[in-house]
Amino acid sequence: MNDKIIISICGAAGAGKSILAKKLVQLIGMDMASRIPGDYYLKSYNGEPFDEFMNTPFKYDWDMVKKVIDIPIGLQAETPDFDFNKLIRVDRKGGKPFTIRRYMIIDTMLPYPKSNYIFRITAPEDLRLKRVKERDKAQKLNSARNWKKMERTAEELGAGKFKFDMVLSGFDEPEVNAEKIKSFLRM
């Protein structure tokens, strides 16, 4: 029981990754599963020409994610503090707290390379952009202005570099997709 199962839920911005990850945690049970909100582990904009930065996919600090995943089960962890408007890491701590559990579910645009299972969720661009704008309004963000970079990341996801255990539709209810994942995992 000390080994962890790492589940990546990946997809383009606005596809429904975070909601699906939260539903999967509820379905598995909060005593057994925990969500890592992975976008807090994005690599910061570091001052290169902004056009150049915007024309490349987002990158993640996978080493930082691994350090968190390596924390013993039952202990508390937290994401870095990340400014999504400026696309910079504010601090290595101070973000979203979570507890390390047997099933660690990370939702990111690109899958965590050391995942045991990778599930991709898809949705058309118009629906995804609508969701991003709604989230921006609710959270007082302006991440939709980074849509070009988000779409470059989505292109990388769809370029055939990754093997998915299952591809899910963002049109399906999150509960339905969570049940499909649980069934696939034979839980």
Image (cartoon, rainbow, N blue to C red):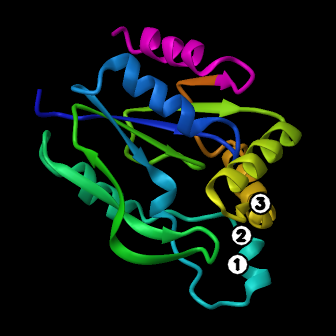
Report the quarter where the N terminus lies: top left
Which residue is disc 2 drawn over? Answer: 56
Which residue is disc 3 drawn over? Answer: 144
The residue positioned 22% from the left and 35% from the top of the image is: 101
Q: Is residue 40 left or right of residue 147?
A: left
Check disc 2 and report its element: helix, strand or loop: loop
Which residue is disc 1 drawn over? Answer: 53
In the foreground, 127 or 41: 127
Q: Do labels 1 and 2 touch, CB within 8 Å? A: yes
Q: Which of marks 3 and 1 is nearer the N terminus?
A: 1
Local packing at callout 2 (Cα closer than 10 Å; few below 14, some 14-19, many 20+) is some
Task: Choose mark 3 or mark 1, whichever is in front.
Answer: 3
- Place residue 12 in its image quadrant: top right
In the foreground, 22 or 156: 22
Q: Position of residue 178 (x, y in %)?
A: 51, 18
Q: Where is residue 84 in the image (x, y as percent from the top left)?
A: 59, 67
Q: Earlier in the sequence, mark 3 or mark 2?
A: 2
> Is residue 118 visible in this depiction of the protein?
no
- C-alpha span from label 3 to label 2: 16 Å
- Check disc 2 and give the amino acid type: Thr
Report the quarter where the C terminus lies: top left
Check disc 3 and report its element: helix, strand or loop: helix
Q: Position of residue 92 (x, y in %)?
A: 33, 73
